[in-house]
Amino acid sequence: MRKRLLTTGEPAPWFAAPTTANPNFHFDTVAGRYVVLSFFESAARPDSRRILDDLWQARARFSDDEVTFFGVSNDPLDQQQGRLQEQIPGLRYFWDFNRQLATEYGAVQFDPSTGLQKFVAHTLVLDARLRVLVALPFDDPATHVARLLHLIDSLPPLGQPHVAEVQAPVMIVPRIFEPEFCRKLIAMYEQHGGTESGFMREKDGKTVGMYDYGHKRRQDFEIPDEDIRKACMIRIHDRLVPEIEKAFQFKATRMERYIVACYDGTQGAHFRAHRDNTTKGTAHRKFAVSLVLNTGEFDGGFLWFPEFGRQLFAPPAGGAVVFSCSLLHEATPVTTGKRYVFLPFLYDDAAARLRDENLRFVSGDANTPQQAQQAAG
């Protein structure tokens, strides 16, 4: 039993369940549009009845193009007595009489004060990837649908189909860190400051750290607080790892580095074209994550992938660019302001064994060399 409702950025669990028209509707097939999923328990509940009536009055707002609606009923009488009106396309209901879906989504919870189960009626709004944008509780039934429609109106349009350009095999995933958490990490950096960040090269059979301001200029702050590190890990695990597994069929189980990096515009901070796994000390790295904390507060500071064209990548604040560590990539100079970014690497258990085997080849800190050598040339 899920102990809480889904939160912003988490993927909605996939399922197959009956609707009126389809005895085995696969929910994952509705991706590609905004999805409203409402857990109302029973149309006989006064709050649910008010919300369902208001939704029916607003049924013209829903279609299978931009926005679609699904309600989840746990009451067999809703079906038997025809309490629910459907509009296809756009407005459907799942029959969840064993409460399996409601339980999986956290609508059915254990109440320790009574020792009984309680139902938490709520409406989820999902993005085109079926990730949670917001959860709206049934706290004010009279305004619930109006608030829902206002939220839908504020969402960016999905755009029209168009011919794709050649693009690097990278993924931008928004809403990994919420705005308050981004500001907290930036404040930690500003309080403590960063140290010069080097890069790794092979030299005489060893992986060694080097500095070369022509190649890389950046300061890093390693997060020491275990609670903050755990908070970072939970967000990456719950909100980003499922997207990587879906897109690349890779299950990340390990995370390397808990650093906030700063690219300072007064230094023209940058990181020239490089790959992240070309030494024995870095060969275990599978995916790089560039999670920008303050998009819109600096100029420059894009990611680009020269092998695949000249598109510049910039995730929204709290969002991440995710890519294979084998891809050639570059962080272009920041020209004004400061670009703050959380920069972990992800790998799995097999790669962890490789990392352990290769530790004997590492000289110094593979993340932020403290005794780094000047790079030749």
Image (tube, rainbow, N blue to C red):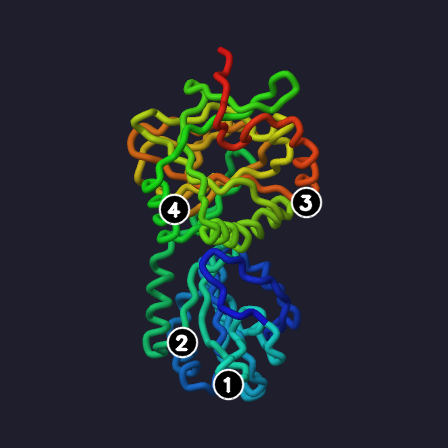
Q: Earlier in the sequence, mark 4 or mark 2?
A: 2
Q: Earlier in the sequence, mark 3 or mark 1?
A: 1
Q: Earlier in the sequence, mark 2 or mark 3?
A: 2
Work out how far the residue at label 4 is from the one at label 2, CA to CA, in angstroms. 33 Å
Query: Which numbered tag is attached to residue 349?
Result: 3
| Image x and y of residue 200, in percent | 55, 25
Q: Is residue 377 visible?
A: yes
Query: Which numbered tag is attached to residue 114?
Result: 1
| Image x and y of residue 149, in percent | 36, 66
Helix, strand or loop at disc 2?
loop
Q: Is residue 178 above or below residue 170?
A: below
Q: Amino acid at mark 4?
A: Leu
Work out how far the residue at label 2 is from the one at label 1, CA to CA, in angstroms. 21 Å
Q: Earlier in the sequence, mark 3 or mark 4?
A: 4
| Neighbours of disc 1 within 10 Å: few (<14), some (14-19), many (20+) | few
Q: Earlier in the sequence, mark 2 or mark 1?
A: 1
Helix, strand or loop at disc 4?
helix
Q: Amino acid at mark 3?
A: Asp
Helix, strand or loop at disc 1?
loop
Q: Earlier in the sequence, mark 4 or mark 1?
A: 1
Label 2 or label 3, whichever lies nearer to me, is 3
| Image x and y of residue 20, in percent | 59, 76
| Neighbours of disc 3 within 10 Å: few (<14), some (14-19), many (20+) | few
| Neighbours of disc 2 within 10 Å: few (<14), some (14-19), many (20+) | many
Residue sitting at x 42%, y 38%: 221
User: Which residue corresponds to mark 2?
Assistant: 138
* Rendered image quadrant of residue 137: bottom left
Query: Which numbered tag is attached to residue 185?
Result: 4
Mark 3 touching mark 1, by CB under 8 A? Answer: no
